[in-house]
Amino acid sequence: MGFVFSRDGFAEVIRQLGSRYRIYAPVLKKGEGRFTDTDVVRYDYVKNFDEIELEKRSDYSFKEILLPVSGTLFYFTEDKVTEPEMDDREILVFVRSCDLHAVKRFDQIYLHNGQERDWFYERVRDRLKFVLIGCRESFDDCFCVDMHTNESTDGYVFSVEEADGEIYSDLKEEGLRELFSGNSVREEDKAPAHVETNKIFVSVPDEVPVSICKDKVWDEYDSRCIGCGRCTLVCPTCTCFTMEDIYYSDNGKVGERRRVHASCMIDGYSNVAGGGEYRKKHGERMRFKVLHKISDFKKKFGYQMCVGCGRCDMVCPEYISFSECINKVDRAIRSAEDGKEAQA
Amino acid sequence: MDINVKELKKNAFRYSKVRGETASRIRITGGKINAKVMRQVAEIAEEYGDGTIFITNRQGIELLGIPMEKMGEVNEKLQPIIDAMGTNQEERGKGYSASGTRNIVACPGEELCPFACYDTTAFARKVEHEIFPNNRHVKVAFTGCSNDCAKVRMDDFGIIGMTEPQYDPDRCIGCGQCVKYCEKRSVGALRLVNNKVVRDTDLCIGCGVCVTYCPTRAWTRSKERYFRLTLLGRTGKKNPRLAEDFIRWADEESITKIIKNAYAYVEEYIDPHAVEGKEHIGYIVDRTGFEEFYKWIMKDVQLPEKAEVSSHMYWGGKWYDRSNELK
Amino acid sequence: MSNPYIPFASKILDVKKHTQKEYTFRMEYHGEVKPGQFFEVSVPKFGEAPISVSGIGDGYVELTIRRVGRVTNEVFENYVGDSLLMRGPYGNGFDISIFDHGETLVVAGGTGVSPVRGVIEALAASPAAKDTHVIVGFRSPADMLFRSDLEEWKDKLDLVLTVDGAPEGYAGNIGLVTKYIPQIQLRDVSAAKAIVVGPPPMMRFSIMGFLDMGFREENIWVSNERKMCCGLGKCGHCRIGDKYVCLDGPVFNYTESKNLID
């Protein structure tokens, strides 16, 4: 069932939902970008509709709610382990379609990879409900259409998008009907907007041969990439973390264990005790990351990892395009195949 | 030919070695000019000068080979440029009203540069508006960060942008990039303790390199803009020297006031017998002592709590009037 | 719902010092465990380190810890005679039933002996002992681990002990393990099985040696050491290609591991 709201009417809906849920949404943080007087859009808790950034794509993804950038797992004393207290309200998370698809990738790793479900992840995940932000237009570097994540038909409580000064919403949860109809201008079925085409096209190879690992396609990244890890830190499908212990007492017996986002692009990710490092070159790291997104994950779980949100392209300080790299890999595979055929 | 050379110089024309010729000096405050105005500048050079344009060290423009008798016409033609730059003027159509206070220099600043901590051109224009026109020989320059691309340490008043890095430990993954880049590109004021970053607040120069390189936005810039004010650097024959730090974590208002106050001090203490009434401010301070200068420039200045003022000021540089020997 | 991240305290029953840098800790443990599996050992102030099971017995496991990182340093300094926090066991481990019949060649280098020590012990005690060949290499005589085990194994199976280098006058074998691989006498190499564990270059060259001798790829097994952090298939550090070393490994058949590119 669809509803059309004035901004004020929808703001009232959000205000009322705010007493039942915590609301986690993209927020424009003024002046908090890399450079002076530049902004960043990242997720935060909001109270009012006005705080929510519906226009711009968030620079950092919603994943920070599922896997906090730096989060305490538990505190320990000499003989006791205590988990941190948690607000037990449900959380409404505002996401676009690509990100809603990314949730499935997170669940895959944290709930379904291996025999154990991730205890910390699950207790947050169980509280999350999603609000779908409709996309009326593609951003410059999106390639969701080619990654088949441009449309979401379920998995959300309601959708939201702004058009011609009105708010359109597609409500999926019967329990909210009264709240929605009471504040709307009219009822009108509106499927959430989604884009049918992007400005960026990627050709993801069906089969990625092992030989691509030795291809020279990765070499340029040895010098171009600075190994800062931004591409993975903003990625809604990068799930890696590192655990670390912090000790409060001198004897080291009282402290906390945390986990922080980890990146296969950043120094130290593949270090083993004694100083060994498996991927020193940035080109190797790029290969490791890219092949995970477009091949290795799929081999294990049956579908592509990358959702084509384009954040990695946008954030790269060295103007390295992930989507362009996919296409370069695809061309390298094709030309290797052509070479083989020619030889045969 | 009868020309009042003193008036000519004051009117921002240059005394040339070619008799009867002059050059017109155009102020480009903060070094930024729009292309349309630049085209007007070029037209004057072609119509009245020999068609060549000299770009000065202080980001000004000089139009060469102008016959002295054309100065009046040139002044009229300069009006739209003066208007476009917003330069203060005593009488319209008469060109620049002074030349002693030099064109105010600025690096490209935040509009372009990833490291700049503020809008250098805007601040330069604001100060220009406060102090120009004035015949006293004062040099002011603005630079966006501690890289000091504008070389403000060669000026009487140098303004260096600063930001106070804001740290959110909850967004920090301990990747150490800020530590590495602070070490390699700045002063090494950061270190990792317990996988979080600790900033040596005394050593930190507020350059913002940590913010630029932080991949998670754990480091962000302070909402407040801060500045380092350096004093009395100079080139020249007698005692060239670099400016020294006077205040760090200063604010825009105080800096503007300090520069303005300096003019009253110069009027009070300038050598009445100075050649052409021109004595560099730094040499006046050498005569009166810094304490007297301090009293004048800090008059009615209310520094914010965060600002720290140097308690003693010493300058280096070679005194050529005492020794010209090489070591 | 139990929380797999929370470690349990395990008493240190005994400590055996092999070298200045390598000790074996006998830890109280009741539960199933296989050679080649590993535990995450927590050390207050420093975090966790993955440690291979080097011995299994009634009510205990043995963990041979090399002092190579911050975490293991701490264990050596402060925790002898106390207890350690551990999680695990993790990983697949070696399936003894594959090796306890027919001919097997085990090649291990340095701390790589730990994960296969349990395999060697099991084979030494089995009827297959006489068909078991073991090549163990250390950097120098001073770096030797499990000296008393080596003495025992010598009597039960075909053991070649070698060091990369030694002071003058050393009477034993000198040379890399790869020098001794071709010298192993096998009745039917095409049916024989091989295991190799050690530093990456040693493993690479040993496998080349096996293949040269005529071992079949599917009869070669390796144990891969990677940075393992969570042990649960979540943190991502140990992933290679589509495999998670902590879940799918660390023991891999060579037909799988040859396609895993770091």
Image (tube, helix red, strand yellow):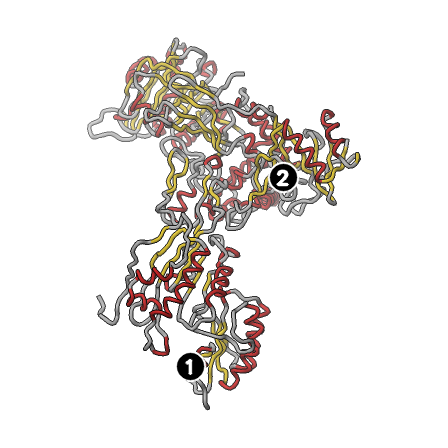
For residue A61, what is the image quadrant?
Answer: top right
Q: Return the residue found at the far left.
A: C169
x and y percent of residue C83 in the render?
A: 35, 16
For the N terminus of chain A, which image quadrant? top right
Query: How many discs mark residues in the rendered view?
Result: 2
**Residue B179 falls in image quadrant:** top left
Q: Secondary structure at mark 1?
A: helix
The C terminus of chain A - image quarter? top right
Q: Is residue C137 visible?
A: no
Depth check, front residue: A301 or C148: A301
What residue type is disc 1 on? Lys
Q: A322 left or right of C31?
A: right
Callout 2 amino acid: Ile
Instruction: Find residue C223 and report its horizontal and vertical position in percent.
Output: 44, 25
Q: Is residue B211 visible?
A: yes
Front disc: 1 or 2? 1
Seen from the viewer's position, the closer of residues A23 and A203 is: A23
Does dot 2 land on a helix, a strand or a loop?
loop
Q: Residues under labels 1 and 2: Cα distance?
A: 64 Å
Give neighbour class at mark 1: few <14, some 14-19, many 20+ (Cα, 10 Å): few
Q: Which chain does the residue under circle 1 lie in? A: B
Q: Position of residue C4 (x, y in %)?
A: 49, 19
Q: Which residue is mark 2?
A: A52
Q: Chain of mark 2?
A: A
Q: Nearer the viewer, residue A206 or A1?
A: A1
Label 2 neighbourhood size at 10 Å, few (<14), some (14-19), many (20+)? many
Q: Is residue C5 left or right of residue B244?
A: right
Residue at x-position 39% and y-position 9%: C59
Do callouts 1 and 2 point to residues on the same chain?
no
Residue A47 relative to residue B28: left or right: right
Q: Which residue is mark 1?
A: B6
Counting from the top left corner in percent of width and height, residue A104 is at 62, 29
